[in-house]
Image (spheres, rainbow, N blue to C red):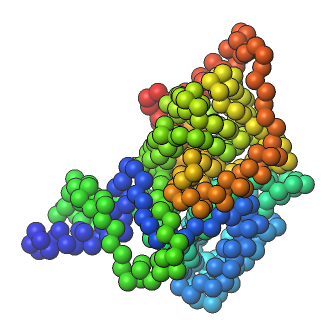
Amino acid sequence: MNPRELAEEAAQALHGIAWYGQRKPVFTGSNAVTLLKRGSEQFAAMCERIDQASQSVWMATYMVSPHGQSGLVLQAMMQAARRGVKVYFVVDGVGSREAPASLWLEMAQAGVQLAIYRPLHGLLSPLDTAQWRRMHMKLCVVDARVAFVGGINLIDDRYDLTHGWTANPRLDYALEVQGAVVMPVAHTIKAMWTRATLGRDWRDDIEHWLGDRNRMKRLRTLWKKSRLRLPASTQDRQATSAAARAPMRCAFVLRDNLLQRRTIERAALQAIQQARTRVDIVTPYFYPARALRHALHDAARRGVRVRLLLQGKVDYKIAAMAARVLYGELQQHGVRIHEYQPAFLHAKVVCVDEDWATVGSSNLDPMSLVLNLEANLVVRDIGFLQTLTAALEADFGESVEVPLPAVLDRTWAMRVRRSVVAWMAKVYLRLGGVTGRY
Protein backbone atom coordinates (compact mmCIF):
# COMPACT_ATOMS: atom_id res chain seq x y z
CA MET A 1 0.00 0.00 0.00
CA ASN A 2 1.51 3.32 -1.08
CA PRO A 3 1.61 6.36 1.24
CA ARG A 4 -1.31 8.04 -0.48
CA GLU A 5 -3.54 4.97 -0.16
CA LEU A 6 -2.49 4.60 3.46
CA ALA A 7 -3.37 8.22 4.19
CA GLU A 8 -6.75 7.84 2.49
CA GLU A 9 -7.45 4.64 4.45
CA ALA A 10 -6.49 6.29 7.72
CA ALA A 11 -8.56 9.39 6.91
CA GLN A 12 -11.55 7.18 6.14
CA ALA A 13 -11.14 5.47 9.51
CA LEU A 14 -11.09 8.87 11.17
CA HIS A 15 -14.17 10.14 9.33
CA GLY A 16 -16.69 11.23 11.89
CA ILE A 17 -14.29 11.20 14.83
CA ALA A 18 -12.10 14.17 13.94
CA TRP A 19 -14.18 16.08 16.47
CA TYR A 20 -12.67 13.89 19.19
CA GLY A 21 -9.25 15.40 18.68
CA GLN A 22 -10.57 18.81 19.69
CA ARG A 23 -9.70 20.29 23.06
CA LYS A 24 -12.18 23.12 22.46
CA PRO A 25 -15.87 23.04 21.49
CA VAL A 26 -16.45 22.42 17.76
CA PHE A 27 -19.62 24.22 16.67
CA THR A 28 -21.84 23.12 13.82
CA GLY A 29 -24.92 24.84 12.42
CA SER A 30 -28.25 23.51 11.16
CA ASN A 31 -29.21 21.96 14.47
CA ALA A 32 -32.61 21.94 16.14
CA VAL A 33 -32.69 21.81 19.95
CA THR A 34 -35.72 21.28 22.19
CA LEU A 35 -35.57 21.90 25.94
CA LEU A 36 -36.96 19.10 28.12
CA LYS A 37 -37.72 19.77 31.76
CA ARG A 38 -37.68 16.79 34.10
CA GLY A 39 -37.83 13.13 33.22
CA SER A 40 -41.57 13.31 32.57
CA GLU A 41 -40.91 15.33 29.39
CA GLN A 42 -37.76 13.49 28.35
CA PHE A 43 -39.18 9.99 28.86
CA ALA A 44 -42.25 10.82 26.77
CA ALA A 45 -40.07 12.21 23.96
CA MET A 46 -37.69 9.24 24.13
CA CYS A 47 -40.52 6.72 24.01
CA GLU A 48 -41.98 8.45 20.95
CA ARG A 49 -38.64 8.39 19.13
CA ILE A 50 -37.83 4.81 20.11
CA ASP A 51 -41.28 3.65 19.01
CA GLN A 52 -40.52 5.18 15.60
CA ALA A 53 -37.03 3.66 15.36
CA SER A 54 -36.35 1.53 12.30
CA GLN A 55 -32.61 0.89 12.54
CA SER A 56 -30.91 1.42 15.88
CA VAL A 57 -31.13 2.76 19.41
CA TRP A 58 -27.94 3.54 21.34
CA MET A 59 -28.20 4.60 24.98
CA ALA A 60 -25.61 5.30 27.68
CA THR A 61 -26.67 6.32 31.16
CA TYR A 62 -25.44 6.38 34.72
CA MET A 63 -28.43 5.45 36.86
CA VAL A 64 -31.23 3.02 35.99
CA SER A 65 -34.46 2.14 37.77
CA PRO A 66 -37.47 0.30 36.33
CA HIS A 67 -39.88 1.96 38.78
CA GLY A 68 -42.38 4.56 37.56
CA GLN A 69 -42.07 6.54 34.34
CA SER A 70 -38.52 5.42 33.54
CA GLY A 71 -39.86 1.90 33.12
CA LEU A 72 -41.76 3.09 30.04
CA VAL A 73 -38.46 3.85 28.30
CA LEU A 74 -37.10 0.42 29.17
CA GLN A 75 -40.25 -1.18 27.79
CA ALA A 76 -39.98 0.88 24.59
CA MET A 77 -36.40 -0.31 24.13
CA MET A 78 -37.44 -3.94 24.54
CA GLN A 79 -40.34 -3.56 22.12
CA ALA A 80 -37.99 -2.00 19.56
CA ALA A 81 -35.56 -4.90 19.91
CA ARG A 82 -38.38 -7.44 19.46
CA ARG A 83 -39.36 -5.89 16.13
CA GLY A 84 -35.80 -6.11 14.83
CA VAL A 85 -34.28 -2.74 15.76
CA LYS A 86 -30.69 -3.02 17.01
CA VAL A 87 -30.74 -1.76 20.59
CA TYR A 88 -27.51 -1.18 22.54
CA PHE A 89 -27.62 -0.16 26.19
CA VAL A 90 -24.53 0.66 28.25
CA VAL A 91 -24.91 1.51 31.93
CA ASP A 92 -22.51 2.40 34.70
CA GLY A 93 -21.67 -0.32 37.19
CA VAL A 94 -22.22 1.91 40.23
CA GLY A 95 -25.24 3.87 39.04
CA SER A 96 -27.08 0.73 37.94
CA ARG A 97 -26.19 -1.41 40.96
CA GLU A 98 -29.69 -1.19 42.43
CA ALA A 99 -31.43 -2.37 39.26
CA PRO A 100 -32.78 -5.92 39.75
CA ALA A 101 -31.12 -8.80 37.92
CA SER A 102 -34.56 -9.68 36.55
CA LEU A 103 -34.54 -6.43 34.55
CA TRP A 104 -31.30 -7.31 32.78
CA LEU A 105 -32.58 -10.82 32.08
CA GLU A 106 -35.83 -9.49 30.63
CA MET A 107 -34.00 -7.02 28.41
CA ALA A 108 -31.57 -9.67 27.19
CA GLN A 109 -34.44 -12.01 26.35
CA ALA A 110 -36.06 -9.19 24.36
CA GLY A 111 -32.88 -8.79 22.31
CA VAL A 112 -31.38 -5.67 23.93
CA GLN A 113 -27.57 -5.76 23.88
CA LEU A 114 -26.43 -4.77 27.38
CA ALA A 115 -22.97 -3.68 28.56
CA ILE A 116 -21.95 -2.57 32.06
CA TYR A 117 -19.18 -0.02 32.37
CA ARG A 118 -16.77 -1.00 35.15
CA PRO A 119 -19.02 -3.37 37.09
CA LEU A 120 -18.38 -3.80 40.79
CA HIS A 121 -16.95 -7.13 41.88
CA GLY A 122 -17.25 -7.84 45.58
CA LEU A 123 -17.52 -5.62 48.63
CA LEU A 124 -13.98 -4.31 48.27
CA SER A 125 -14.49 -2.90 44.77
CA PRO A 126 -15.08 0.68 46.03
CA LEU A 127 -11.60 0.59 47.58
CA ASP A 128 -10.09 0.25 44.12
CA THR A 129 -9.43 3.90 43.26
CA ALA A 130 -9.56 3.11 39.54
CA GLN A 131 -13.26 2.42 40.10
CA TRP A 132 -13.83 6.01 41.18
CA ARG A 133 -13.88 7.21 37.56
CA ARG A 134 -17.45 6.54 36.53
CA MET A 135 -19.43 6.92 33.31
CA HIS A 136 -21.77 9.72 34.38
CA MET A 137 -23.14 10.56 30.91
CA LYS A 138 -26.84 10.49 29.97
CA LEU A 139 -27.06 10.05 26.20
CA CYS A 140 -29.34 8.44 23.64
CA VAL A 141 -29.32 8.35 19.83
CA VAL A 142 -32.15 6.94 17.70
CA ASP A 143 -31.54 5.98 14.06
CA ALA A 144 -28.45 8.24 13.98
CA ARG A 145 -30.93 11.07 13.55
CA VAL A 146 -32.16 12.23 16.96
CA ALA A 147 -30.12 12.56 20.13
CA PHE A 148 -30.88 13.23 23.79
CA VAL A 149 -28.23 14.94 25.94
CA GLY A 150 -28.64 16.09 29.51
CA GLY A 151 -28.52 15.35 33.19
CA ILE A 152 -31.59 13.16 33.56
CA ASN A 153 -30.96 9.59 34.67
CA LEU A 154 -33.26 6.76 33.68
CA ILE A 155 -35.15 7.07 36.95
CA ASP A 156 -38.58 8.47 37.83
CA ASP A 157 -38.70 12.14 38.87
CA ARG A 158 -40.25 11.27 42.21
CA TYR A 159 -38.01 8.32 43.03
CA ASP A 160 -34.59 8.50 44.67
CA LEU A 161 -32.39 5.45 45.21
CA THR A 162 -31.38 6.69 48.67
CA HIS A 163 -34.49 8.47 49.92
CA GLY A 164 -37.24 6.50 48.17
CA TRP A 165 -40.39 8.15 46.79
CA THR A 166 -40.84 11.89 47.22
CA ALA A 167 -43.87 14.16 47.03
CA ASN A 168 -42.45 16.60 44.47
CA PRO A 169 -40.59 15.85 41.24
CA ARG A 170 -36.84 16.33 41.04
CA LEU A 171 -35.68 19.36 39.02
CA ASP A 172 -33.62 18.37 35.99
CA TYR A 173 -33.06 19.29 32.34
CA ALA A 174 -32.17 17.60 29.06
CA LEU A 175 -32.14 18.43 25.36
CA GLU A 176 -33.56 16.70 22.29
CA VAL A 177 -31.32 17.40 19.31
CA GLN A 178 -31.41 16.95 15.55
CA GLY A 179 -28.72 17.95 13.10
CA ALA A 180 -24.99 17.64 12.60
CA VAL A 181 -24.24 17.52 16.33
CA VAL A 182 -25.94 14.12 16.60
CA MET A 183 -22.89 12.46 15.03
CA PRO A 184 -20.42 12.97 17.92
CA VAL A 185 -23.11 11.95 20.41
CA ALA A 186 -23.53 8.64 18.57
CA HIS A 187 -19.78 8.05 18.42
CA THR A 188 -19.46 8.75 22.14
CA ILE A 189 -22.06 6.15 23.09
CA LYS A 190 -20.31 3.63 20.84
CA ALA A 191 -17.03 4.54 22.54
CA MET A 192 -18.60 3.82 25.92
CA TRP A 193 -19.88 0.52 24.56
CA THR A 194 -16.38 -0.42 23.39
CA ARG A 195 -14.84 0.46 26.73
CA ALA A 196 -17.45 -1.55 28.60
CA THR A 197 -17.43 -4.65 26.36
CA LEU A 198 -13.76 -4.92 25.43
CA GLY A 199 -12.21 -3.48 28.55
CA ARG A 200 -10.16 -0.98 26.55
CA ASP A 201 -10.66 2.37 24.92
CA TRP A 202 -12.01 2.71 21.39
CA ARG A 203 -8.87 4.62 20.40
CA ASP A 204 -6.87 1.45 21.01
CA ASP A 205 -8.99 -0.35 18.41
CA ILE A 206 -8.07 2.22 15.77
CA GLU A 207 -4.40 1.94 16.71
CA HIS A 208 -4.64 -1.84 16.36
CA TRP A 209 -6.34 -1.42 12.98
CA LEU A 210 -3.50 0.77 11.78
CA GLY A 211 -1.06 -1.80 13.12
CA ASP A 212 2.66 -1.48 12.56
CA ARG A 213 2.13 0.76 9.56
CA ASN A 214 0.90 3.76 11.43
CA ARG A 215 1.16 4.24 15.18
CA MET A 216 -0.50 6.72 17.49
CA LYS A 217 1.86 9.51 16.50
CA ARG A 218 0.42 9.54 12.99
CA LEU A 219 -3.10 9.22 14.35
CA ARG A 220 -2.65 12.38 16.38
CA THR A 221 -1.21 14.15 13.34
CA LEU A 222 -4.30 13.26 11.34
CA TRP A 223 -6.51 14.49 14.17
CA LYS A 224 -4.79 17.87 14.04
CA LYS A 225 -5.02 18.13 10.25
CA SER A 226 -8.68 17.21 10.15
CA ARG A 227 -9.88 18.98 13.27
CA LEU A 228 -12.09 21.47 11.42
CA ARG A 229 -13.20 19.06 8.72
CA LEU A 230 -16.54 17.49 9.47
CA PRO A 231 -17.70 16.24 6.06
CA ALA A 232 -21.36 15.27 5.92
CA SER A 233 -22.41 12.10 4.17
CA THR A 234 -25.70 11.82 2.30
CA GLN A 235 -27.26 10.25 5.38
CA ASP A 236 -25.93 13.09 7.53
CA ARG A 237 -27.43 15.69 5.18
CA GLN A 238 -30.78 13.92 5.23
CA ALA A 239 -30.68 13.82 9.02
CA THR A 240 -30.02 17.55 9.22
CA SER A 241 -32.63 18.60 6.65
CA ALA A 242 -35.36 18.70 9.30
CA ALA A 243 -33.23 21.14 11.26
CA ALA A 244 -32.37 23.40 8.35
CA ARG A 245 -34.96 25.98 9.30
CA ALA A 246 -33.64 26.18 12.85
CA PRO A 247 -29.89 26.66 12.35
CA MET A 248 -28.82 26.60 15.99
CA ARG A 249 -25.08 26.48 16.55
CA CYS A 250 -24.19 23.63 18.88
CA ALA A 251 -21.08 21.90 20.18
CA PHE A 252 -20.98 18.54 21.91
CA VAL A 253 -18.32 18.59 24.63
CA LEU A 254 -16.85 15.77 26.70
CA ARG A 255 -14.83 15.25 29.82
CA ASP A 256 -12.79 12.07 29.57
CA ASN A 257 -9.38 10.82 30.59
CA LEU A 258 -7.84 11.00 27.12
CA LEU A 259 -7.77 14.16 25.03
CA GLN A 260 -10.65 16.13 26.53
CA ARG A 261 -9.90 16.15 30.22
CA ARG A 262 -10.83 19.82 30.75
CA THR A 263 -12.98 20.65 27.72
CA ILE A 264 -16.26 21.16 29.62
CA GLU A 265 -14.62 23.15 32.41
CA ARG A 266 -12.66 25.38 30.04
CA ALA A 267 -15.71 26.06 27.87
CA ALA A 268 -17.65 27.29 30.90
CA LEU A 269 -14.65 29.21 32.22
CA GLN A 270 -14.14 31.06 28.94
CA ALA A 271 -17.83 31.93 28.67
CA ILE A 272 -17.88 33.32 32.22
CA GLN A 273 -14.70 35.32 31.63
CA GLN A 274 -16.32 36.94 28.58
CA ALA A 275 -19.74 37.52 30.20
CA ARG A 276 -21.20 40.99 29.77
CA THR A 277 -24.60 40.98 31.49
CA ARG A 278 -25.41 37.77 33.38
CA VAL A 279 -24.25 34.35 34.50
CA ASP A 280 -26.80 31.85 35.84
CA ILE A 281 -25.54 28.50 37.14
CA VAL A 282 -27.77 25.65 38.26
CA THR A 283 -26.07 22.63 39.80
CA PRO A 284 -26.64 20.32 42.76
CA TYR A 285 -22.95 19.80 43.58
CA PHE A 286 -20.78 22.90 43.61
CA TYR A 287 -17.13 22.94 44.54
CA PRO A 288 -15.36 24.29 41.44
CA ALA A 289 -11.65 24.78 40.93
CA ARG A 290 -10.04 28.04 41.97
CA ALA A 291 -9.90 29.42 38.42
CA LEU A 292 -13.65 29.10 37.96
CA ARG A 293 -14.39 30.65 41.36
CA HIS A 294 -12.14 33.60 40.52
CA ALA A 295 -13.90 33.99 37.18
CA LEU A 296 -17.22 34.30 39.03
CA HIS A 297 -15.69 36.86 41.42
CA ASP A 298 -14.33 38.92 38.54
CA ALA A 299 -17.59 38.81 36.61
CA ALA A 300 -19.59 40.03 39.59
CA ARG A 301 -17.09 42.80 40.31
CA ARG A 302 -17.36 44.17 36.75
CA GLY A 303 -21.16 44.44 37.05
CA VAL A 304 -22.31 41.09 35.64
CA ARG A 305 -25.28 39.60 37.49
CA VAL A 306 -24.01 36.27 38.81
CA ARG A 307 -26.52 33.86 40.36
CA LEU A 308 -26.16 30.31 41.62
CA LEU A 309 -29.10 27.94 42.13
CA LEU A 310 -27.99 25.16 44.46
CA GLN A 311 -29.64 22.50 46.57
CA GLY A 312 -32.00 23.53 49.33
CA LYS A 313 -33.20 20.00 49.95
CA VAL A 314 -29.97 18.12 50.55
CA ASP A 315 -29.36 14.58 49.34
CA TYR A 316 -25.67 14.20 50.31
CA LYS A 317 -24.55 16.14 53.38
CA ILE A 318 -20.85 16.16 52.49
CA ALA A 319 -21.57 17.68 49.08
CA ALA A 320 -23.78 20.36 50.66
CA MET A 321 -21.11 21.19 53.23
CA ALA A 322 -18.51 21.54 50.47
CA ALA A 323 -20.68 24.07 48.63
CA ARG A 324 -21.65 26.03 51.72
CA VAL A 325 -18.09 26.66 52.89
CA LEU A 326 -17.72 28.76 49.73
CA TYR A 327 -20.83 30.89 50.27
CA GLY A 328 -19.10 33.68 52.20
CA GLU A 329 -16.27 34.04 49.70
CA LEU A 330 -18.66 34.17 46.74
CA GLN A 331 -21.13 36.57 48.37
CA GLN A 332 -18.33 38.87 49.42
CA HIS A 333 -17.53 39.39 45.75
CA GLY A 334 -21.16 39.98 44.74
CA VAL A 335 -22.30 36.50 43.72
CA ARG A 336 -25.96 35.83 44.64
CA ILE A 337 -26.76 32.37 45.96
CA HIS A 338 -30.20 30.75 45.89
CA GLU A 339 -31.27 27.35 47.25
CA TYR A 340 -34.03 25.42 45.49
CA GLN A 341 -36.81 24.46 47.90
CA PRO A 342 -39.60 22.25 46.47
CA ALA A 343 -37.62 19.06 45.80
CA PHE A 344 -34.21 17.60 45.05
CA LEU A 345 -32.19 19.55 42.49
CA HIS A 346 -30.28 17.56 39.87
CA ALA A 347 -30.07 19.99 36.92
CA LYS A 348 -26.72 21.03 35.46
CA VAL A 349 -27.13 24.25 33.48
CA VAL A 350 -24.96 27.30 32.80
CA CYS A 351 -26.37 30.37 31.01
CA VAL A 352 -24.18 33.29 30.00
CA ASP A 353 -25.59 36.49 28.50
CA GLU A 354 -28.24 36.01 25.82
CA ASP A 355 -26.62 33.51 23.48
CA TRP A 356 -24.53 30.90 25.35
CA ALA A 357 -25.75 27.96 27.41
CA THR A 358 -24.70 24.46 28.30
CA VAL A 359 -26.87 21.60 29.55
CA GLY A 360 -25.56 18.16 30.37
CA SER A 361 -24.34 15.72 32.97
CA SER A 362 -21.41 17.65 34.43
CA ASN A 363 -21.66 19.18 37.88
CA LEU A 364 -19.21 21.84 39.02
CA ASP A 365 -17.38 19.67 41.52
CA PRO A 366 -14.17 17.58 41.49
CA MET A 367 -15.90 14.32 40.56
CA SER A 368 -17.40 15.77 37.38
CA LEU A 369 -14.61 18.14 36.41
CA VAL A 370 -11.59 15.84 36.78
CA LEU A 371 -12.73 12.25 37.37
CA ASN A 372 -15.98 11.12 35.77
CA LEU A 373 -16.79 10.72 32.09
CA GLU A 374 -19.23 13.55 31.32
CA ALA A 375 -21.08 14.95 28.30
CA ASN A 376 -22.67 18.38 27.74
CA LEU A 377 -24.15 20.28 24.84
CA VAL A 378 -23.27 23.94 24.32
CA VAL A 379 -25.91 25.96 22.46
CA ARG A 380 -25.36 29.39 20.88
CA ASP A 381 -28.83 30.63 19.95
CA ILE A 382 -30.84 33.62 21.18
CA GLY A 383 -34.23 31.93 20.73
CA PHE A 384 -33.21 28.86 22.68
CA LEU A 385 -31.72 31.03 25.43
CA GLN A 386 -35.04 32.85 25.77
CA THR A 387 -36.83 29.54 26.33
CA LEU A 388 -34.23 28.30 28.79
CA THR A 389 -34.14 31.62 30.64
CA ALA A 390 -37.91 31.58 31.14
CA ALA A 391 -37.68 28.07 32.61
CA LEU A 392 -34.82 29.02 34.93
CA GLU A 393 -36.60 32.15 36.13
CA ALA A 394 -39.45 29.92 37.30
CA ASP A 395 -36.91 27.76 39.15
CA PHE A 396 -35.25 30.75 40.80
CA GLY A 397 -38.75 31.88 41.78
CA GLU A 398 -39.14 28.67 43.78
CA SER A 399 -35.88 29.21 45.61
CA VAL A 400 -34.78 31.17 48.64
CA GLU A 401 -31.87 33.56 48.34
CA VAL A 402 -29.23 33.04 50.98
CA PRO A 403 -28.73 36.44 52.67
CA LEU A 404 -25.30 37.96 52.91
CA PRO A 405 -24.40 37.86 56.60
CA ALA A 406 -23.89 41.24 58.24
CA VAL A 407 -20.48 40.05 59.34
CA LEU A 408 -18.75 37.39 57.28
CA ASP A 409 -18.03 34.30 59.31
CA ARG A 410 -14.28 34.27 59.76
CA THR A 411 -14.32 32.33 63.00
CA TRP A 412 -11.94 29.49 63.63
CA ALA A 413 -14.82 27.03 63.18
CA MET A 414 -15.49 28.25 59.62
CA ARG A 415 -11.79 28.20 58.79
CA VAL A 416 -11.56 24.66 60.10
CA ARG A 417 -14.58 23.53 58.06
CA ARG A 418 -13.18 25.05 54.89
CA SER A 419 -9.74 23.56 55.51
CA VAL A 420 -11.24 20.14 56.15
CA VAL A 421 -13.26 20.25 52.92
CA ALA A 422 -10.22 21.38 50.93
CA TRP A 423 -8.09 18.61 52.47
CA MET A 424 -10.74 15.97 51.76
CA ALA A 425 -11.03 17.10 48.14
CA LYS A 426 -7.26 17.02 47.71
CA VAL A 427 -6.92 13.54 49.20
CA TYR A 428 -9.83 12.23 47.14
CA LEU A 429 -8.34 13.52 43.91
CA ARG A 430 -4.86 12.24 44.72
CA LEU A 431 -6.24 8.77 45.41
CA GLY A 432 -8.19 9.00 42.17
CA GLY A 433 -4.97 9.67 40.27
CA VAL A 434 -5.37 13.41 39.74
CA THR A 435 -2.22 15.48 40.17
CA GLY A 436 -1.76 19.22 40.21
CA ARG A 437 -3.73 21.93 41.98
CA TYR A 438 -7.52 21.94 41.82
**Which quarter of the rendering shows the N terminus?**
bottom left
Q: Is residue 200 above or below residue 148?
A: above
Q: Position of residue 367 (x, y in %)?
A: 58, 41
Q: Is residue 348 left or right of residue 257?
A: right
Q: Quadrant of residue 104?
A: bottom right
Q: Nearer the viewer, residue 234 or 400?
A: 400
Viewer can see residue 109: no
Q: Position of residue 438 (x, y in %)?
A: 50, 30
Image position, residue 355 (x, y; %): 54, 53
Task: Please give the name of the residue rendered at 25% of the width and 69% of the height, measured from the top-left corner.
Answer: 11
Q: Nearer the viewer, residue 159 or 196?
A: 159
At x 76%, y 71%, the residue is 71
Quick one: which residue is furthest to the right in this view? 167
Q: Is residue 150 above or below residue 367?
A: below
Residue 59 x, y percent position in the rendering: 58, 69
Relative to 57, is 347 above or below?
above
Residue that lies at the very extreme toward the left in this rendered image: 2
Q: Quadrant of residue 317?
A: top right
405 lies above or below 296 = above
Q: Residue furthest top?
A: 412
Q: Residue at x 79, y 69 (%)?
A: 69
Residue 237 in sight in this render: yes
| Count of numbered circles on the image | 0
Q: Is residue 71 left or right of residue 285?
A: right
Q: Is residue 227 left or right of residue 111?
A: left
